[in-house]
């Protein structure tokens, strides 16, 4: 199959996007429209708590791509690196963030990666011309280096497997290499490589975006589903405790969207625990550059989750299976600028500058909205990965002398710090705004096909309740680009006694961003702690803002 760049492929198929509903579809959130200048009312009741959210809901992703690994987390020549070559400043930053799980080694990279190239004495490892990003891969960082880095950064691995140019046998071999104690071919090879204790990797992705013609080893849904079933079966013989994730559709714009997922699951349902969802959002093709539309895009994440969940449940019914699959939203972020030419083609070089997207304020606000969508769907989404973590479409950027935090760092950091316990099923009454319907052939995507109606709530809310710690957290996204918005939180059972923390991310310029020489240009500000009286907390959200407030019971 000829190689088709992902962006061109998706542009060609955008108009054929599948979408089932023209109405706003939000699971676990009751939404009602309020009159234009009325305050938004958020009805919150700790008795409407969902099952405890999985910490892996706020994972991330590191691919052998550009400067994510080399010059990002691993740079033996750097004065900021430790004796093993790991950047200490970067590992500390990630540890302090509290990232629970990191997907590795790809992404598109994994579909041409032979894991044996990345283990054993470093001097013997081959230098490879890597085909997904046309880059030089010296294999100086591989599986064991990643496991050691995970320990240093305080996270767990989510390992990707090559089901493109490799096969189920080698997938099971990697499980044996990582998880078997000793006395078998692959576990003894690990021990010969100086690693006595098994890594005990629990979560595995069975390939990456195999529905995409850009993917090395791309195949049909049935072929892939059979290969995933075979891999799952062999891997479970090695370690029955694994959590396995099948490759779902790589985008809602794929012509095979939902069909792919159904056909794949019909082949491998009994061998997997979850299915992957991917989605990158942008303020260009999808929106025509209209920021008011862009701010609504997190609602399409709610919609995508609802659709994939329906496919899983349909196949479960057809299979008469008692098992309910969970969802792994293992690639999500804003990504629309660095998608063509030299931004995605390494020219055969080592650690090229690829996908180094610079994020602005409006991107961070949408990422906040996406955090809200993940929280309110946390009863079904168990794993999700902000794609990615360092230098490549990332919240953290490095150079030879240090690092800085991009705008999107902050909503992600707040999710990690404050989204604790269980998500609450909220009822929200908000004034709304209208978004224009598309006109003409060159117009942006029809939002109704993304599950977004023309009527958008100004305020998007999510909340968590940590019963054991006695804390509530609310995450409030004001999509109004012009005006502040009043909010009343109505505590339907117990009202909180005080505010512990409150911050907002806002600014006058939606296009403002950070840089090495302006690292604090867009950064959170303290938000006046709101008072609570008569079971009601009143506050005013600044225009263009994302705000977190943590309350004590
Ligand atoms: O995250 C960047 C790329 O986006 C990944 O390699 C691929 O899976 C997706 O298309």
Image (spheres, rainbow, N blue to C red):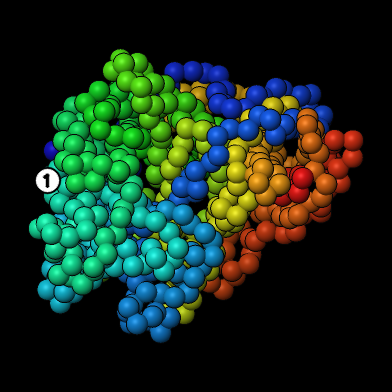
Horizontal arrangement in the rendering, residue 390 relative to residue 259 (left or right): right
User: Front-most of 36 and 531?
Assistant: 531
What residue is drawn where x is 56% and y is 53%? 416
Farthest residue, direction right: 534
User: Front-most of 292 and 156?
Assistant: 156
Give the structural element (helix, strand or loop) at label 1: helix
243 over 305 or under it: above or below? below
Residue 331: quadrant of the picture: top left
226 over 329 or under it: above or below? above
Horizontal arrangement in the rendering, residue 392 relative to residue 483 (left or right): left
Residue 81 drawn at (x, y percent): 39, 79
What residue is drawn where x is 59% and y is 69%? 519
| Quadrant of the snapshot with the N terminus | top left
Q: Does residue 1 appear anywhere in the picture?
A: yes
Q: Does residue 344 appear anywhere in the picture?
A: no
What residue is drawn where x is 11% and y is 57%? 184
Residue 352: quadrant of the picture: bottom left
Residue for badge 1: 169
281 over 504 or under it: above or below? above
């Amino acid at each position: 199959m000829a190689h088709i760049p992902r962006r061109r492929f998706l542009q060609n198929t955008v108009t054929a996007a599948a979408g089932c509903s023209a109405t706003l579809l939000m699971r676990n959130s009751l939404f009602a429209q309020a009159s234009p200048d009325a305050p938004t009312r958020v009805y919150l009741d700790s008795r409407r708590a969902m099952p405890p959210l999985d910490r892996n809901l706020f994972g991330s992703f590191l691919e052998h791509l550009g400067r994510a690994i080399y010059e990002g987390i691993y740079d033996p020549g750097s004065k900021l690196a430790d004796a093993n070559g790991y950047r200490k400043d970067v590992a500390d930053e990630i540890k302090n963030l509290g990232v629970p799980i990191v997907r590795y080694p790809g992404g598109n990279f994994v579909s041409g990666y032979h894991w044996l190239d990345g283990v054993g004495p470093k001097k013997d490892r081959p230098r490879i011309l890597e085909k997904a990003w046309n880059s030089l891969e010296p294999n100086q960082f591989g599986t064991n280096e990643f496991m050691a880095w995970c320990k240093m950064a305080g996270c767990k691995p989510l390992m990707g497997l090559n089901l493109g140019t490799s096969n189920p046998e080698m997938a099971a071999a990697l499980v044996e290499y990582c998880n078997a104690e000793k006395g078998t071919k692959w576990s003894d090879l690990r021990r010969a490589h100086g690693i006595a204790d098994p890594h005990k990797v629990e979560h595995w992705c069975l390939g990456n975006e195999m529905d995409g013609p850009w993917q090395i080893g791309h195949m049909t849904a049935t072929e892939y589903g059979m290969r995933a079933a075979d891999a799952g079966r062999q891997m479970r013989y090695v370690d029955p405790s694994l959590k396995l994730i099948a490759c779902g559709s790589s985008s809602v714009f794929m012509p095979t969207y939902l069909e792919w997922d159904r056909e794949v699951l019909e082949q491998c349902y009994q061998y997997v625990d979850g299915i992957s969802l991917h989605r990158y959002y942008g303020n260009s093709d999808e929106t025509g550059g209209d920021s008011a539309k862009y701010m609504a895009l997190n609602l399409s994440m709610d919609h995508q989750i609802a659709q994939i969940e329906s496919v899983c449940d349909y196949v479960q019914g057809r299979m008469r299976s008692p098992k309910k699959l969970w969802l792994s939203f293992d690639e999500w972020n804003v990504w629309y600028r660095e998608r063509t030419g030299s931004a995605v083609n390494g020219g055969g070089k080592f650690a090229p500058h690829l996908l180094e997207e610079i994020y602005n304020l409006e991107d961070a606000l949408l990422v906040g909205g996406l955090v809200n969508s993940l929280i309110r769907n946390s009863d079904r989404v168990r794993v999700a990965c902000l794609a990615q973590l360092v230098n490549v479409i990332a919240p953290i950027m490095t150079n030879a002398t240090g690092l800085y935090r991009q705008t999107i760092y902050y909503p992600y950091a707040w999710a990690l710090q404050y989204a604790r316990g269980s998500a609450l099923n909220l009822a929200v009454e908000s004034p709304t705004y209208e978004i224009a319907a598309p006109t003409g052939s060159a117009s942006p995507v029809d939002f109704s096909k993304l599950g977004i109606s023309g009527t958008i709530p100004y305020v998007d809310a999510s909340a968590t309740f940590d019963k054991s710690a006695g804390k509530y957290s609310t995450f409030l996204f004001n999509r109004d680009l012009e005006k502040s918005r009043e909010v009343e939180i109505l505590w339907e059972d117990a009202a909180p006694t005080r505010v512990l923390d409150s911050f907002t991310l806002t600014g006058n310029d939606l296009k403002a961003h950070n840089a090495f020489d302006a690292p604090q240009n867009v950064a959170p500000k303290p938000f006046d702690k709101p008072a609570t009286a008569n079971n009601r907390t009143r506050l005013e959200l600044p225009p263009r803002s994302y705000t977190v407030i943590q309350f004590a019971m």
